[in-house]
Image: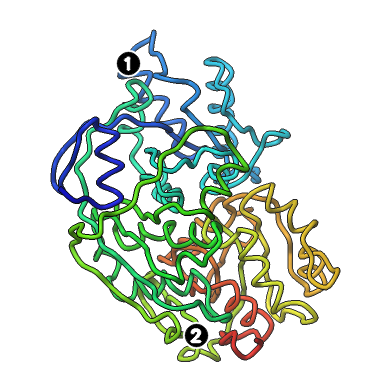
């Protein structure tokens, strides 16, 4: 029987020759990830349910990244990190990346890739909805709640229903004025925030495979914004080169069968797409940058697991170079490695970081920062009545701070062009 990419990986993880959508199976989990928001309650549930002598099923497969509420004086946020620190020390967790140390890595979803945990053909669960980011590596990855994570922590297994798959094919070359963010916003505009509920969103086509791993992660990261269980892209030579640079772990590449069954298929002519935005207050509130151009802004933000990767900053720097921003603009690298790259990578001999500083941007420390609001002292946080254009993944009321602010989601090209003019701007005006 033919199967999709997601079905093949889940069949392997459930020790079956084949699986079908709707079937419930026990999965063996290869990696469990958690962070400072969900880690403490997950640990608490694990200790309560597995007892005083609770054992972690495999300490080498548990990965913990403080990243969400870290550069803050908020005592509750600080306490969460302390709880993780105490747990990691008590149980001798090898893969704990503590903030304030040389091991600190930044946003969990990007750090998972950089540290070699994203392996084709494997299964990864995390206590964060954007864990689906890792699906860019031809693997199954999804977010779970604290109770499910606690069960995985104790057993290494989870009971799951096999999802149906939706296929999105982007034909043709990607024009220079488009990025992966424009592609995924178009998808969300088509299917809405519940159009992919409990489905696997599979991305395919020439434009997808021309993307770097950074950009592919943008597509799979926002699969959850369509209600999906996971996003996934089959591994190719680009994937393999990235993985082999970071780990020598064995992996297996799976491909969807040509006659695999999908719930639905969508085909886009990439060359006909335009720079996109998601208007307040939902990621599926699709429009073109041209249609909303002129909308007055109070702040611009380039960062997050969706928009804080090196490729995002290269895109923004191309437009910001030699220009000045006219609204407060925040540059927040998703990882400490990306922060390092901002100093090492250059355009015409000028480092990316210097380009941003010359343009009048504020370059912040690597973290989730304002992407999900955070305590009042979070850098870049939106306040009442602000209108923000951002490379982040959600624009629900209060997502970046005040519920009385409005957030437009866009590509780093569109955000950079808009930051210069102080109003939403089609990046083609600068390219």
Farthest top residue in view: 53
Question: Is 233 left or right of 104, judged from the image as shown?
Answer: left
Q: Are marks 1 and 2 in contact (CB under 8 Å)?
A: no
Q: Which residue is mark 2?
A: 289
The spot of residue 414 in percent (x, y) is 57, 79
Residue at x-position 32% and y-position 21%: 155
**Can you tell which quarter of the image residue 97 is in?**
top right
- The foreground one among 358 and 86 is 358
Q: Is residue 89 visible?
A: yes
- The foreground one among 168 and 186 is 168
Residue at x-position 24% and y-position 57%: 165
Query: Dot 1: what SS?
Result: helix
Mark 1 vs mark 2: in front: 2
Give above or below for 295 relative to 52.
Answer: below
Q: Which residue is mark 1?
A: 50
Residue at x-position 70% and y-position 76%: 318
Crowd around label 2: few <14 · some 14–19 · many ≥20 (10 Å):
many
């Amino acid at each position: 029987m033919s199967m999709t990419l997601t079905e093949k990986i889940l069949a392997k993880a459930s020790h079956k020759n084949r699986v079908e959508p709707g079937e419930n199976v026990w999965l063996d989990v290869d990696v469990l990830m958690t962070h400072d928001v969900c880690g403490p309650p997950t640990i608490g549930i694990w200790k309560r349910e597995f007892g005083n002598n609770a054992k972690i099923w495999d300490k080498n497969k548990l990965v913990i990244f403080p990243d969400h509420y870290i550069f803050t004086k908020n005592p509750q946020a600080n306490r969460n990190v302390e709880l993780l620190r105490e747990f990691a020390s008590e149980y001798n967790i090898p893969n704990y990346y503590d903030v304030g140390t040389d091991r600190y890595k930044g946003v969990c979803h990007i750090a998972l890739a950089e540290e070699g945990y994203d392996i084709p053909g494997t299964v990864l669960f995390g206590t964060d909805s954007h864990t689906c980011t890792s699906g860019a590596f031809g693997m199954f990855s999804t977010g779970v709640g604290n109770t499910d994570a606690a069960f995985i922590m104790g057993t290494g297994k989870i009971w799951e229903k096999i999802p149906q798959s939706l296929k999105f094919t982007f034909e043709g070359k990607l024009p220079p004025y488009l990025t992966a963010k424009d592609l995924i916003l178009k998808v969300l505009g088509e299917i809405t925030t519940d159009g992919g509920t409990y489905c696997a969103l599979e991305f395919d086509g020439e434009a997808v495979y021309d993307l770097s791993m950074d950009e592919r992660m943008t597509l799979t990261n926002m699969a959850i914004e369509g209600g999906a269980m996971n996003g996934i892209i089959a591994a190719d030579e680009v994937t393999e080169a990235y993985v082999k640079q970071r780990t020598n772990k064995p992996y297996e590449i799976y491909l969807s069968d040509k006659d695999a069954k999908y719930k639905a298929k969508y085909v886009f002519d990439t060359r006909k797409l335009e720079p996109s935005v998601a208007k307040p207050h939902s990621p599926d509130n699709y429009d073109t940058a041209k249609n909303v151009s002129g909308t007055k802004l109070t702040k611009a933000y380039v960062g997050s697991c969706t928009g804080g990767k090196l490729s995002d900053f290269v895109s923004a720097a191309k437009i910001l170079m030699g220009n000045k921003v006219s609204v407060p603009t925040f540059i927040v690298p998703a990882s400490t490695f990306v922060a390092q790259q901002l100093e090492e990578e250059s355009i015409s001999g000028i480092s990316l970081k210097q380009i941003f500083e010359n343009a009048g941007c504020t370059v912040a420390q690597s973290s989730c920062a304002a992407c999900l609001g955070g305590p009042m002292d979070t850098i870049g946080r939106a306040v009442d009545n602000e209108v923000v254009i951002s490379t982040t993944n959600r624009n629900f009321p209060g997502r970046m701070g005040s519920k009385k602010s409005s957030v437009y989601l866009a590509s780093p090209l569109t955000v950079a062009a808009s930051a210069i003019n102080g109003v939403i701007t089609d990046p083609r005006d600068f390219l």
